[in-house]
Image (spheres, rainbow, N blue to C red):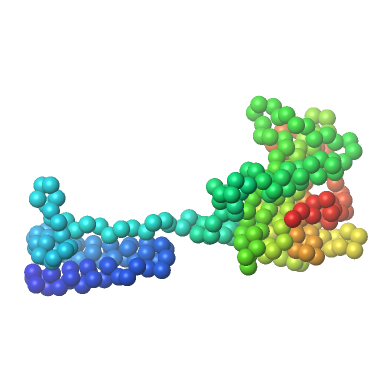
Amino acid sequence: MNAEQLRETLRSELAASNPPPPPSTTVALGAGRRALLRRRAVWACTGSAATVLAIAAVAALPGLASQGPAGEVYRPAAAGPQSIPQPSTTSTAGPHPSPTQPWPTGPDGQPQEDRTARAGTRYDQGAKLLEQILAVVPPGYTAPENPPADQAPLREHQAQFEDRVNGVDVWSYLSSVTLAEGKRQGNLLVEVHTAGNELPTEPCALAQRFWGMKGECQAVTAGARKVGVVVRPTGDDRFDQWAAYRHPDGVVVFVAQSRGSNGGATELPKLPFSVEQLAALATDDRFHLE
């Protein structure tokens, strides 16, 4: 490649790497990377001698070069995108929304820092869910509050923004308690997804969406309602059983139980609720939160 060909190549590359502003930061990032790869390929093909000619050629193009303090010639780098979308994660409800959408507004009138509500109405709903779980602790069991120093909290609650579907904010509320029978400990957890979520309607398909866990599912009748209950998990033992119910207005409730909790030394001899009782809990109106 001679000097004239090299100049023509560089002019083409410079033109190609400076298109009109792209419509999104994702496109800008991709275009910038492609342009960088093209420029690297050109420099690699010309060799060290051609590099000297290339510098001179760029310097000869008006407005494209300037001198550094030691006299070296360089072309200022183009401005990069202002922000890069973060990768989305997944939850029970599926993919989380793109962070290009603003987080919901908190009680201070400002967008939240992340998905979790730490104050306000949504936070209060998560706390209310914990109160409702404590109200259904079965006879013979307690729900201790203070864990030993080496254990996780024995009671927890959280409110989390899940998605924005057709302009509607979808939230999930999660609360769990440790159930104790003497020195033996198990766990009870309830997770609620507000109306507008895109979770399945069929009971067992819904149950199989809980935390991505799979298992042997039964459609159980609780009153006049059909509930999906996984009675035996396959390949994931975080919970022994869980039930799933979608209310007519779209609110989804998951109730899960396990014989072991928080790494305790002993497990409960049996699960606190029968399959039928677990299904009934999933339809309990006290867990129907907005």
* Image vertical order of residue 28 relative to residue 273, above or below: below
- The residue lying toward the viewer, choosing from 255 and 62, is 62
Please say whether residue 142 is visible from this viewpoint. Answer: yes
* Image vertical order of residue 93 relative to residue 190, above or below: below
Q: Which residue appears farthest toward the top when viewing the image?
A: 149
Q: Quadrant of residue 231?
A: bottom right
Please say whether residue 47 is visible from this viewpoint. Answer: no
Residue shown at 19% from the left, 58% from the top: 75
Q: Quadrant of residue 157?
A: top right
Q: At which x and y percent is residue 87?
A: 49, 56
Q: At which x and y percent is residue 272?
A: 84, 43
- The residue lying toward the viewer, choosing from 200 and 79, is 79
Residue shown at 68% from the left, 53% from the top: 172
The N terminus: image quadrant: bottom left
- The residue lying toward the viewer, choosing from 241 and 226, is 226
In the displayed structure, does residue 214 sit left or right of residue 226? left
The C terminus: image quadrant: bottom right
In the displayed structure, does residue 4 sit left or right of residue 113? left
